[in-house]
Amino acid sequence: MTIQDFGVSYDELEPFFDKAEKVFGTSGSAWSIKGQVVGKDKGGNPFAPDRSDNFPLPAQKRTYSAQLFAQAAESVGYHPYDLPSAKTSGPYTNPYGAQMGPCNFCGFCSGYACYMYSKASPNVNILPALRQEPKFELRNNAYVLRVNLSDDKKRATGVTYVDGQGREQVQPADLVILSAFQFHNVHLMPLSGIGKPYNPITNEGNFGRNFPYQNLSTLKALFDKNTTTNPFIGAGGAGVGIDDFNADKFDHGPHGFVGGSPFWVNQAGPKPISGLPVPAGTPNWGSQWKAAVADTYTHHLSMDAHGAH
C-alpha cells in the first residue's frame, strides 16, 4: 500500500459531492455551511468539513437503538451525529425531475430494492431522465468481454460484448468508461491488454496495486426484556455515529497505525438468519436456537466499526 496525499483536495471535490447529494435525495444534518455553524445541538457532526449548501432533506428520524447509542456516546464525552443517508426523509424531486417517495422504515433496506422509491439508485434517480434522451440506449443482459484498442494500444475504440441471445457484438466508441466495479474493472484490463499486473515482489505494474478493502466489525448488544428495540423497523443508512476515532481526529502515535474508523448504530433491518443474534453457547440450529432467537430478537441492537486498510 502506497501512503501518499490524495491527488485532489476536498475543496475541489465538494461541489461534486453537493451535486451528487442533490441527485440522490440525501437526508442529513449539516454542521457548518460556508463557514457558519448551523448544526450545533441539531444532529450535525462537529468533525465534518465545511459545506457549500445544506443537505437536500433533513436527517431521518432516529430509531430507538440510535437514540440509545446517542445517549451512551454523549454520556462519555463523544460527539454523536445523524448519519447522512441516501434515503429520503420526505417526498423529493431531484434536479433531473426524478421523484422519490418518503421512506417508511419498512426494514428491507439491507440488501433489497425499495418499493417506495426512497433509496438512491441509478434506476430511481438517473435512468428516468436518461430514458428521455434520444441519444441514450440501455442494453440489458450485455456482458462485456474486452475493451478494444487502437493498433498502438494507447486508445480505446469500443468494446466487444455478448448480448442477451449469446451473440458476440462489437460496439465502436470514442469514449469507454470502466464502471463494472472494482474486481470486474481489474479483470477487464488484462483481458483487454491494458496496463501491467502489479507484482508485489518487484513492486512493478499498475492495476491491482493499492487494493483497498473494508474492515467492518459488527458488535451485537443483547438487552433484557425491559428494552425493546424492534429491529424489524429500519431505514438504510439512517442511524447515529461518532467520528471521534475516525481519520486524524485522535492521536495515532501510541497505536502503530494510520487511519481510523467511524462507529455507528444503523438499524437497516436484519437479514434472515445472519441478522438474528443469540447468546454465546447457543446451538447453531434446532429448537434451542429457535427459542433463543425468539427470546432476543426484539431486544438487541447492532453496532459497526468501519476501519480503513
Image (cartoon, helix red, strand yellow):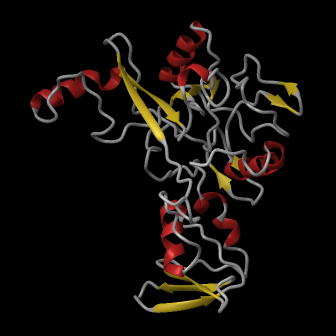
Instruction: Residue at 59%, 67% (x, y): give it.
Output: 179
Residue furthest left as drawn: 287
Residue furthest top as drawn: 75
Q: How many marks?
A: 0
Instruction: Residue at 64%, 44% (x, y): give it.
Output: 3
Q: Is residue 214 above or below residue 197?
A: above
Estimate the x, y position of residue 157 in percent, counting from the top left: 66, 87
Residue furthest front as drawn: 202
Estimate the x, y position of residue 186 in percent, counting from the top left: 52, 67
Instruction: Residue at 60%, 11% (x, y): give it.
Output: 74
Q: Is residue 150 above or below residue 176?
A: below
Q: Is residue 282 above or below residue 137?
A: above
Residue 274 figure quarter: top left
Residue 238 figure quarter: top right
Estimate the x, y position of residue 225 in percent, counting from the top left: 31, 12
Instruction: Residue at 60%, 70% (x, y): give it.
Output: 178
Estimate the x, y position of residue 237 in percent, counting from the top left: 55, 38
Q: Is residue 30 above or below residue 193?
A: above
